Image (spheres, rainbow, N blue to C red):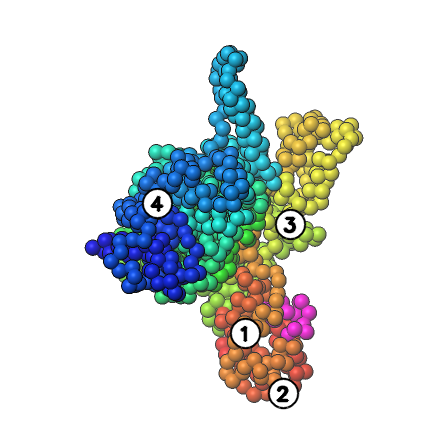
C-alpha cells in the first residue's frame, strides 16, 4: 500500500510539472502553471518529480477549470504514468523513454564524434534540447555509459596483414573508416601517455605495476566535458541524469554482482568522475552523495583497479578528485549538527565519501615515489606470548590481532603500504579534513573500530583523514583499555591462583642509579612475562613521597633518556652538526641493553609520555619496516651524503681521478680505523663511472643497515614488545611516529595562554595573571623550556602543540615568600598572589631553575 501511495504522489508531481494545476496565477515554482516556471522535457520532469517527492514539496490542488478533465497534455500524461510504473518496479526502462527521430531516438551510447555532431546541429538551430535529451538518456543509464566513449579497437598483426591483402578497390567510405580508426589509435596512444603526465614517479610505477587497461577513452571524455559543461542547460542534464543513475547502479552492485559479469562496468565510475563540476554546490545535496554510495559498493578488485588507474593521472587530476570528496564531507559536516547523540559515523554520505577518498589516497601513494624493495627482515624469534594467554581465552579476553596490527584490505589487494611511499603525488596533509575531526566522537569511533561490524563505520579505518591529535586520542583509548584489561586479568589470577595482586608495572628506582635499577627490572619482566609491560606504569623514586599520577613517570623517562644518550656510555654516537644520535656500530653493550632502550621508547608511547630523543627520520622508517637507503643519509649523515652525491654528479673519469675501491673505512670508539669490503675482494675492485651508483647504494646500505643490524634488531624487538598489539603502525606514518614520541618542537606560548584554565579565585583578568603571562612571554627559549619542565614534567609540546596541554593555574594563598609549586601529573601550577611583578618574576625563575624531586604538599 505504501508503495502504491508513493507511486501516486510521484505521478501527481509529474503531472504538476508537465501540465500544471490550471491556475494561471499559481505561486508554486514547481508547478507548470506558474508564470515563473521553466518548462522541462519528460525525462527531466521525471527526475524532478522524484526530487519533489523526497523533499515532501508543496503539491497544488487542481484548479476548478481542470477538474473532470483527463489531461491537458495526454501524451505527457501517458508517458508519465508509464515512466513511474517502471520506476515503481525498480528501474526505468530507457527504451520506453525514446524521443522522436529528430531527437536521435536510436542513439543508446555516445562517442566524442557523435557528441560533437549533435552539438553542431544544436548550435545551428539554437535549440539544445536534442543534446540535452541524449545526455539525459545515456548518462542516466549504466548500460549506455558502459558502451560509451570506447577506445578504438586495435588490430592484431594477423588482422592488419589480412586488411592489407584485401582488394585495393575497396569502397572509399571504408578507406575513410580505416583512416579514422588509425587516427583514433594514435590519439589513444597519446592519451595513455598523457594520463600519467605530471609525475615521472607515476610513470616509473606504471612500469613496475603494469599499465591499467580500460576500454574507455579517458581523454575523449575530458574533451567532451570541457566542451559541454560551459553550457548551463547541458550541465543541468548531467546533474539530473546522475540523480537517476546512482540508485540503479547501487542496486546493480549490491544485488546483481554486475562487475563480475562485466568488468567494463567500471567505465561508469571512470566517466562520471571526470566531471570537473562534481564538487559544485548543485551536486553536493543529492547527486554526489548518492553516487558515492554507489561507488562504495564496488567489489575489492574493482576498487584496486580504479586506484591503479587514477595513480596514472597527473597531480592536478588527483587533487581535483580529492577536493571533490573533501567538499562533500565538509559540506555535510557543516550543514548538520553532529554530536554524541547524532554521530557523524551514521551519516551515509560522509561514510561513502570517505570510502571513495580512500581509493584516491591509495592512487596518490601508488603514483608517488615508491620504494617497495628495501624492507627490513622480520625478527627471527617471535615475541614470547604471555603465560596468561590460556586464562585470557577462558575468560573471553583473548588478544585481538595477535599476528600484528590489522591491514587495510585495499592495501593488501594493491600489494603496497603507505610506508612504501617516499613522496606522494600530493602531500598527505591534503587528505586531512579538519571539520570532520572537530565533530568526531573519538570514544565512540574507537568502539566501532574494535568491534569491526559492517553496520558501524569507524573513521580509524581511514586514518589518512584524521589529524595527528585525533589519531593520538584513538591510540590513547586503545592503550588505556589494554591497561584495564591487564589489570582485570591480574585480579582474576590473584583470585584463582592465589598470586599476589600486582595490577601495575611498578618500577622503584634510585635517582643516582636510575639506569641500573630500571633496566635490570625491565629486563626481568621482559624475560619472565612480557605481558606485564602492557600494564600501567607506576614509578616511585626511593626516598621521595611523590605519588605517580603521570608526572613522576614523565620525569623518570626524562632522566632515563638523558643517561642512555650520554655519549660517554657509548651506545649512541652524536653528530654536532645535525644534533642527532645514531647507533654506535662498535658499542660494547650487549643486545639486551638495546632491547631495553626499545622497551623504554615503547613504554613512553604506551603511557602517553613525550621523550626528548633526537633520532634521524630513518630510525622511525626502520621501525615501520623499511630499510635505510642513500637518500636517508641526507638526514642522518649529511657530510657523507654530500660526498657520495658529488661522486654521482662528477663529470670526469671516476676511476682515474678519484681512485676509489669497494673497500671503506670507519673509526671505532678509540679512533682506530676499521676496514670493510662492500663486495668480496673490494680493495681490488675500482669504482668506475658505470659502477658508482652500485657503490653508493652499497655504502648507504652498510652505514644505515648492515653496520648496525645487531643493535637495531634488538632495539626494534624491545619496541615491539610493548607496541606489537597496538594500532600504532596502522594509524601513523613515520613522521607522525616521531611527533608522537618527541612531541612538537614549536613552543607557542600564546596558544598555551589561550587554553589555560584558572582555579581558586583566579581568572584571566586578574592583575597577577596578566603579570604572570607578561613575565612568561618575556622569558628566553631555554627559560620557557624550564617552565614547561617544571609545570608539566616535560619541556616538549604534546601532539597538536601547547594549545592541547590544558594547564591550570590555581591560587595558592596570599602574598608570601613561598615559591610556586606544581602538580606535574595534572599540569597544575600553584601560584601565590605575589604583591609585585618583580617578586613574581624572581620567585618563578628560582622555582623553575632549581626544581628537582617530588614531595607531598
- Local crowd at mark 1 within 10 Å, few (<14), some, or many (≥20)? many
Q: Which residues are magenta?
A: 776-790
Residue 358 in the figure: left or right of residue 248: right
- Local crowd at mark 3 within 10 Å, few (<14), some, or many (≥20)? some
Q: Position of residue 857 (x, y in %)?
A: 50, 79
* The N terminus: image quadrant: bottom left
CA gap, disc 2 and disc 1? 22 Å
Q: Nearer the viewer, mark 2 or mark 4?
A: 4
CA gap, disc 1 and disc 3? 39 Å
- Local crowd at mark 2 within 10 Å, few (<14), some, or many (≥20)? few
Where 618 falls versus 459 (above or below)? above
Where 353 falls versus 663 (above or below)? below
> Residue placed farthest to the left in the image?
1
Residue at the disc numbered 4: 248
Residue at the disc numbered 3: 573
168 vs 428, nearest the viewer: 168
Q: Earlier in the sequence, mark 2 or mark 1?
A: 1
Residue at the disc numbered 1: 756
Q: Nearer the viewer, mark 3 or mark 4?
A: 4
CA gap, disc 2 and disc 3? 49 Å
Whether residue 532 is in magenta: the answer is no
Q: Earlier in the sequence, mark 2 or mark 4?
A: 4
Q: Earlier in the sequence, mark 1 or mark 4?
A: 4
Q: Residue at x 54, y 31 (%)?
A: 188
Q: Residue at x 38, y 41 (%)?
A: 99
Numbered label attached to residue 835: 2
Q: Position of residue 574 (x, y in %)?
A: 66, 51
Q: Nearer the viewer, mark 1 or mark 4?
A: 4
719 vs 361, nearest the viewer: 361
Amino acid at each position: 500500500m505504501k508503495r502504491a501511495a508513493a507511486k501516486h504522489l510521484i505521478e501527481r508531481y509529474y503531472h504538476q510539472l508537465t501540465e500544471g494545476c490550471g491556475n494561471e496565477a499559481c505561486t508554486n515554482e514547481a508547478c507548470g502553471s506558474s508564470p515563473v516556471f521553466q518548462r522541462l522535457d519528460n525525462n527531466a520532469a521525471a527526475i524532478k518529480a522524484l526530487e519533489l517527492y523526497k523533499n515532501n514539496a508543496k503539491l497544488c490542488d487542481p484548479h476548478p477549470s481542470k477538474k473532470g478533465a483527463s489531461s491537458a497534455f495526454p501524451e505527457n500524461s501517458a508517458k508519465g504514468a508509464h515512466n513511474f510504473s517502471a520506476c515503481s518496479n525498480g528501474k526505468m526502462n530507457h527504451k520506453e523513454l525514446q524521443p522522436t527521430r529528430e531527437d536521435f531516438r536510436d542513439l543508446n551510447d555516445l562517442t566524442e564524434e557523435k557528441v560533437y555532431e549533435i552539438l553542431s546541429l544544436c548550435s545551428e538551430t539554437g535549440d539544445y534540447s536534442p543534446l540535452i535529451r541524449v545526455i539525459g538518456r545515456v548518462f542516466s543509464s549504466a548500460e549506455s555509459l558502459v558502451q560509451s566513449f570506447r577506445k578504438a579497437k586495435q588490430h592484431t598483426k594477423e588482422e592488419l596483414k589480412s586488411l592489407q591483402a584485401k582488394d585495393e578497390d575497396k569502397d572509399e567510405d571504408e578507406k575513410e573508416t580505416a583512416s579514422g580508426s588509425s587516427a583514433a589509435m594514435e590519439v589513444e596512444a597519446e592519451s595513455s601517455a598523457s594520463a600519467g603526465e605530471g609525475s615521472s614517479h607515476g610513470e616509473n610505477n606504471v612500469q613496475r605495476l603494469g599499465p591499467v587497461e580500460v576500454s574507455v577513452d579517458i581523454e575523449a571524455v575530458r574533451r567532451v566535458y570541457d566542451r559541454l559543461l560551459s553550457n548551463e542547460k547541458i550541465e543541468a542534464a548531467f546533474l539530473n541524469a546522475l540523480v537517476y543513475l546512482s540508485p540503479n547502479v547501487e542496486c546493480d552492485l549490491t544485488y546483481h554482482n554486475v562487475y563480475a559479469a562485466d568488468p567494463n562496468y567500471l567505465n561508469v565510475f571512470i566517466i562520471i568522475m571526470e566531471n570537473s563540476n562534481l564538487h559544485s554546490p548543485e551536486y553536493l545535496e543529492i547527486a554526489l552523495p548518492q553516487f558515492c554510495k554507489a561507488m562504495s559498493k564496488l567489489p575489492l578488485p574493482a576498487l584496486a583497479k580504479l586506484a591503479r588507474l587514477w595513480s596514472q593521472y597527473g597531480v592536478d587530476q588527483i587533487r581535483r578528485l580529492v577536493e571533490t570528496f573533501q567538499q562533500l564531507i565538509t559540506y555535510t559536516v557543516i550543514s548538520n549538527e553532529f554530536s554524541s547523540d547524532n554521530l557523524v559515523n551514521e551519516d551515509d554520505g560522509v561514510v561513502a565519501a570517505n570510502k571513495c577518498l580512500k581509493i584516491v589516497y591509495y592512487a596518490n601513494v601508488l603514483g608517488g615515489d615508491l620504494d617497495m624493495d628495501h624492507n627490513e627482515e622480520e625478527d627471527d624469534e617471535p615475541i614470547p606470548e604471555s603465560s596468561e594467554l590460556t586464562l585470557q581465552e577462558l575468560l573471553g579476553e583473548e588478544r585481538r590481532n595477535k599476528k600484528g596490527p590489522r591491514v587495510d584490505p585495499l592495501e593488501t589487494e594493491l600489494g603496497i603500504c603507505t610506508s612504501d611511499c617516499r613522496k606522494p603525488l600530493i602531500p598527505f596533509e591534503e587528505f586531512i579534513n579538519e571539520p570532520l575531526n572537530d565533530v568526531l566522537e573519538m570514544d565512540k569511533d574507537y568502539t566501532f573500530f574494535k568491534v569491526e561490524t559492517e553496520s558501524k563505520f569507524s573513521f580509524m579505518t581511514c586514518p589518512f583523514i584524521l589529524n595527528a591529535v585525533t589519531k593520538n586520542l584513538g591510540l590513547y583509548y586503545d592503550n588505556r583499555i589494554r591497561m584495564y584489561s591487564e589489570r582485570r586479568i591480574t585480579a582474576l589470577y590473584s583470585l584463582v591462583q592465589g598470586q599476589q595482586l600486582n595490577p601495575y608495572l611498578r618500577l622503584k628506582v634510585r635517582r643516582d642509579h636510575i639506569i641500573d635499577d630500571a633496566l635490570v627490572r625491565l629486563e626481568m619482566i621482559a624475560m619472565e612475562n612480557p605481558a606485564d609491560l602492557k600494564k600501567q606504569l607506576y614509578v616511585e623514586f626511593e626516598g621521595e613521597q611523590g605519588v605517580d599520577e603521570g608526572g613522576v613517570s614523565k620525569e623518570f623517562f626524562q632522566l632515563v633518556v638523558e643517561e642512555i644518550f650520554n655519549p660517554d656510555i657509548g651506545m649512541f654516537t652524536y653528530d654536532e652538526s645535525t644534533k642527532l644520535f645514531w647507533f654506535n656500530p662498535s658499542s660494547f653493550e650487549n643486545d639486551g641493553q638495546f632491547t631495553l632502550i626499545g622497551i623504554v621508547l615503547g613504554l613512553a608511547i604506551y603511557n602517553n609520555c613525550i621523550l626528548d630523543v633526537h633520532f634521524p627520520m630513518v630510525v622511525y622508517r626502520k621501525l615501520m619496516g623499511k630499510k635505510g637507503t642513500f637518500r636517508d643519509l641526507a638526514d642522518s649523515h649529511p657530510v657523507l651524503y654530500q660526498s657520495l652525491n658529488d661522486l654521482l654528479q662528477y663529470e670526469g673519469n671516476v676511476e682515474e681521478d678519484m681512485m676509489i675501491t669497494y673497500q671503506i673505512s670507519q673509526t671505532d670508539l678509540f679512533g682506530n680505523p676499521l676496514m670493510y669490503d662492500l663486495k668480496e675482494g673490494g680493495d681490488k675492485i675500482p669504482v668506475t663511472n658505470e659502477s658508482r651508483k652500485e657503490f653508493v647504494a652499497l655504502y648507504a646500505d652498510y652505514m644505515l643497515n648492515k653496520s648496525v643490524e645487531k643493535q637495531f634488531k634488538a632495539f626494534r624487538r624491545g619496541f615491539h614488545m610493548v607496541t606489537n598489539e597496538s594500532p600504532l603502525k596502522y594509524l601513523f606514518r613515520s613522521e607522525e611516529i616521531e611527533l608522537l614520541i618527541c612531541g612538537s618542537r614549536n613552543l607557542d606560548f600564546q596558544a598555551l595562554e589561550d587554553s589555560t584554565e584558572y582555579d581558586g579565585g583566579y581568572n584571566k583578568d586578574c592583575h597577577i595573571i596578566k603579570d604572570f603571562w607578561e613575565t612568561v612571554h618575556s622569558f628566553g627559549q631555554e627559560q620557557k623550556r624550564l617552565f614547561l619542565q617544571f609545570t608539566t614534567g616535560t619541556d616538549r609540546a604534546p601532539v597538536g602543540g601547547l594549545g592541547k596541554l590544558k594547564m591550570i593555574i590555581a591560587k595558592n594563598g596570599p602574598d608570601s615568600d613561598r615559591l610556586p609549586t606544581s602538580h606535574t601529573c595534572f599540569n597544575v601550577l600553584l601560584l601565590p598572589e605575589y604583591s609585585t611583578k618583580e617578586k613574581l618574576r624572581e620567585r618563578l625563575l628560582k622555582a623553575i631553575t632549581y626544581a628537582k624531586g617530588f614531595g607531598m604538599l
